[in-house]
Image: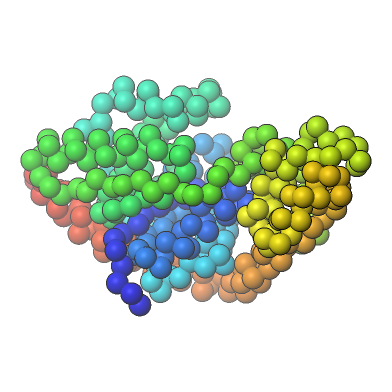
């Protein structure tokens, strides 16, 4: 194994039924980062509590997310994979960091305002403190690098500010300012071709579905809206199916579609059939591995227990330093 160049931390919410947007935007990147970094990946069940109405699916969704991550290629012998609430030190650090957090900064965040708009009847205290808990996640593990999408950039900037405030207030050099690592994949649009792929908009393509279910979802995809009839020439540059072909489909076929679509040589139906086939092929190893893991739930739980034990060891070490810096009696 080559030496690692730093520690990566990221948290992923247990949304249940991961989709192509989660996979291309986050999970694939998590897998790749393992080659260069020591990685700590956390399924953030506590963060999930800020937006759910009930917790009936929380355990199942957390388990499913673990299956997705492991099936995608997270290597638990190297990487620490764990469930946020299994390391309660994070809630202690959250409380301590909250004291160096100006309230106005939290209520000004665009992410908070958006959530408040989405759930006006459930603007809970946890929702306001969401970025503080996220900062606690990151700094508890003395993480150097945090891979997240652009929507999370304000939270990373917030984390850096909290670290500076903490170190300044307690005259300590205990916490580390993390760097943000922007994930390279452009944002993945849903089957509507308009909005970002998301479960709440019901425009997703699930990665663990059957090939037939996947094919049906793909056939529902909106293509170039200007191309009404089969004989109309299309414009791949504005077609969401084409943008996904570019990620999934072998280069030769991408070049062919790029030419044939523009001269109506290939129709949208055939183009989507081709995409569905390639997508199913690309997801085949993931689905096979996921099936194997799903047959061994005790093994998956043991992996999460082991990850939590390793995470707790790092977390407790940081907390000893934090409590000392704060001079808790
Ligand atoms: N807020 C992140 C999201 O919504 C999830 C998250 C929680 C996270 N804690 C984190 C991401 C720490 C990176 C680091 O996607």
Q: Is residue 310 above or below residue 103?
A: below
Along the viewing direction, whichever of 295 and 150 lies nearer the viewer: 150
**Image position of 190 (left or right of 296):** right
Q: Quadrant of ligand 1?
A: top left
Along the viewing direction, whichever of 173 and 228 lies nearer the viewer: 228
| x 37%, y 37%: residue | 155
Residue 267 image position (x, y, % from top left): 86, 47
Residue at the bottom extreme? 1
Colour convention: rainbow
Residue 152 image position (x, y, % from top left): 43, 39
| x 39%, y 27%: residue | 109
| Residue 279 in sight here | no
Residue 85 image position (x, y, % from top left): 39, 52
Total numbered circles: 0
| x 22%, y 41%: residue | 163
Along the viewing direction, whichever of 13 and 120 lies nearer the viewer: 13
Q: Quadrant of the C terminus?
A: top left
| Residue 245 in sight here | yes
Q: Quadrant of residue 232?
A: top right
Q: Is residue 303 above or below residue 186?
A: below
Q: Quadrant of the N terminus?
A: bottom left
Q: Quadrant of residue 294?
A: bottom right
Residue 274 image position (x, y, % from top left): 79, 58
| x 91%, y 42%: residue | 230
Q: Is residue 154 above or below residue 289?
A: above
């Amino acid at each position: 194994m080559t030496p690692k160049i730093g520690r990566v931390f990221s948290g992923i919410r247990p949304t249940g039924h991961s989709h192509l947007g989660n996979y291309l935007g986050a999970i694939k990147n998590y897998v790749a980062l393992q080659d260069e970094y020591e990685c700590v990946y956390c399924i953030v069940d506590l963060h999930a509590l800020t937006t759910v109405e009930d917790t009936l699916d929380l355990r199942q969704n957390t388990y499913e997310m673990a299956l997705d991550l492991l099936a995608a290629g997270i290597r638990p012998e190297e990487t620490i994979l764990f469930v946020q609430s299994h390391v309660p030190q994070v809630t202690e650090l959250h409380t301590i960091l909250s004291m160096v957090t100006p309230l106005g900064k939290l209520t000004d965040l665009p992410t908070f305002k958006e959530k408040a708009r989405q759930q006006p009847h459930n603007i809970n205290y946890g929702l306001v403190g969401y970025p503080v808990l996220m900062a606690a996640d990151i700094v508890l593990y003395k993480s150097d690098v945090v891979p997240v999408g652009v929507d999370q950039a304000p939270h990373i900037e917030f984390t850096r500010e909290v670290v500076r405030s903490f170190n300044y207030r307690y005259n300590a050099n205990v916490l580390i300012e993390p760097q943000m690592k922007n994930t390279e994949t452009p944002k993945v649009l849903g089957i509507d071709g308009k909005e970002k792929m998301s479960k709440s908009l019901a425009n997703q393509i699930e990665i663990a579905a059957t090939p037939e279910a996947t094919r049906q979802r793909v056939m529902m995809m909106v293509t170039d809206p200007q191309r009404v009839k089969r004989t109309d020439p299309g414009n791949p540059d504005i077609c969401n199916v084409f943008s996904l072909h570019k990620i999934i489909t072998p280069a030769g076929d991408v070049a062919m579609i790029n030419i044939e679509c523009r001269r109506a040589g290939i129709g949208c139906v055939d183009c989507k059939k081709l995409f569905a086939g390639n997508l199913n092929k690309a997801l085949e190893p993931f689905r096979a591995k996921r099936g194997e893991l799903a047959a061994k739930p005790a093994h998956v739980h043991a992996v999460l227990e082991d990850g939590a034990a390793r995470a707790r060891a790092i977390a407790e070490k940081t907390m000893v330093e934090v409590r000392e810096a704060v001079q808790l009696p």
